[in-house]
Image (spheres, rainbow, N blue to C red):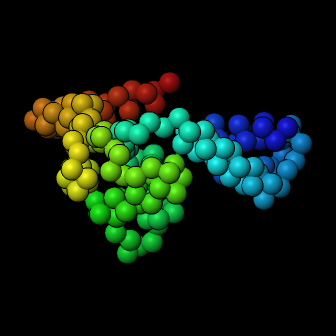
């Protein structure tokens, strides 16, 4: 039953207090669910640490990177490459028993923070090809932005006819 709750909440990105809602599952309290999620996270970290090689790559995607949310959630927080480096250094040491110097490369979008982070770590940045494609398409379509806006407005009107 507990696994059902954890799976439901995690796979559907639901709030942790969702377990207090009326459902077909037997009710559990938020504290039990949070405690269980922490145990699962620690077990996964231990498994990853055991299998992690001495040299590895870092893959950074800023949008879903929830691990940094607790560190960077205040209005005045610093989102610099140095802050990212310190976070990665501490997280790798504490959770995986690894040193940041063991990282061989970074995969991420081509933003200035990732470029600077790669420079700080003296490792190559493998820029995201899809990000480069998106930037190229935006530049190409910029010339037609007014026409595309008109087409989009027309499509919205046509969608509402039914």
Look at 10% across and 35% down and name the residue there: 143
Q: Is residue 77 left or right of residue 40?
A: left
Q: Residue 84 occupies which quadrant of the picture? A: bottom left
Task: Return the x and y of residue 128 as percentages of the image width and height.
Answer: 26, 35
Q: Residue furthest left?
A: 143
The residue at the point 46 percent across, 31 percent down is 160
**x 63%, y 36%: residue:** 11
Q: Residue at x 37, y 62 (%)?
A: 86
* Quarter assignment of residue 109: top left
Tell me residue 119's x, y (percent): 19, 53
Given the current orientation, which residue lies at the most extreme top position?
A: 162
Whether residue 88 is visible here, answered yes or no, is yes
Q: Is residue 146 left or right of residue 57?
A: left
Name the foreground residue: 55 vs 145. Answer: 55
Total labels: the figure holds 0
Direction right: furthest residue: 26
Q: Is residue 144 visible?
A: no
**Residue placed farthest to the front in the image?**
54
Q: With respect to residue 152, does 46 lie above or below?
A: below
Q: Is residue 77 above or below residue 142?
A: below
Residue 156 is situated, as x and y percent measured from the top left of the image, at 38, 33
Foreground pick, 120 / 1: 120
In the rendered image, the quadrant that contains the N terminus is top right
Q: Is residue 49 left or right of residue 14?
A: left
Q: Position of residue 54 (x, y in %)?
A: 41, 39
């Amino acid at each position: 039953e507990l696994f059902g709750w954890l799976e439901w909440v995690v796979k559907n990105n639901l709030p942790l207090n969702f377990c207090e809602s009326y459902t077909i599952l037997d009710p559990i309290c938020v504290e039990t669910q949070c405690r269980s999620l922490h145990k699962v996270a620690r077990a996964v970290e231990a498994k990853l640490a055991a299998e992690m090689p001495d040299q590895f790559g870092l893959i950074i995607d800023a949008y879903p990177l929830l691990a940094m949310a607790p560190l960077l959630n205040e209005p005045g927080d610093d989102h610099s490459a140095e802050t990212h480096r310190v976070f990665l250094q501490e997280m790798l040491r504490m959770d995986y028993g690894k040193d940041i110097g063991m990282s061989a490369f970074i995969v991420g979008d081509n933003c200035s923070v990732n470029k600077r982070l790669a420079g700080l770590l003296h490792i190559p940045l493998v820029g995201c090809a899809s990000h480069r494609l998106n930037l190229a398409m935006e530049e190409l379509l910029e010339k037609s932005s007014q026409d595309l806006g008109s087409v989009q407005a027309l499509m919205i009107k046509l969608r509402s006819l039914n």
